[in-house]
Amino acid sequence: MEVLKINYKIKINNNCLNLKVVNSVRGENEKDESLGEGIGLKNVRRRLELIYPEKHTLDIHQSEKEFEVNLEVCGINE
């Protein structure tokens, strides 16, 4: 049985929230070429743009072994 892992790191620095989440994916999964096109991610991107316009970055990367999300939101205490 393959062990899947989830790691995360959250920090607040200079009024910015940084969140990094990395999870392993099953070896037989192929890289999803439509990454970022699902309705859930579209909704997340839209909400971030409405609440934190030009104050956030959302980067998503997928390899054969890992799925990684990096989110930075600045101006969280304004």
Image: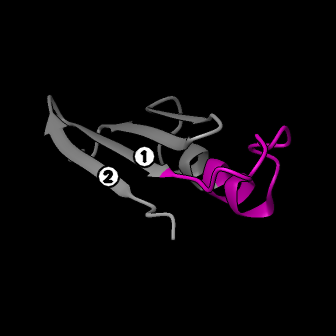
Viewer-proximal residue among 69 and 71: 69
- Residue 52 coordinates in the image, percent (x, y): 47, 43
| Residue 18 left/right relative to 54 | left
| Image quadrant in which the C terminus is located | top left
Q: Which amino acid type is shown beneath numbered disc 2?
A: Asn
Q: Residue at x 82, y 48 (%)?
A: 37
Residue identifier under label 2: 7
Q: Where does the magenta region start and end?
A: 24-46
Quarter where residue 34 is shown? top right
Disc 2: CA contacts within 10 A as few (<14), some (14-19) or many (>=20) = few
In terms of secondary structure, where does tag 2 sit?
strand
Which of the marked residues, 1 or 2, is nearer the chain's N terminus? Answer: 2
Q: Nearer the viewer, residue 49 or 69?
A: 69
Residue denoted by label 1: 22
Closer to us: 15 or 37: 37
Q: Which mark is residue 14?
A: none
Residue 51 spot, x, y in % from top left: 50, 51
Measure the C-alpha gap from mark 1 to mark 2: 5 Å
Q: Are marks 1 and 2 in contact (CB under 8 Å)?
A: yes
Q: Amino acid at mark 1?
A: Val
At a point 16% along the width and 41% down the height, the residue shown is: 12
Look at the picture and state if 30 lies above or below 13.
below
Q: Secondary structure at mark 1?
A: strand
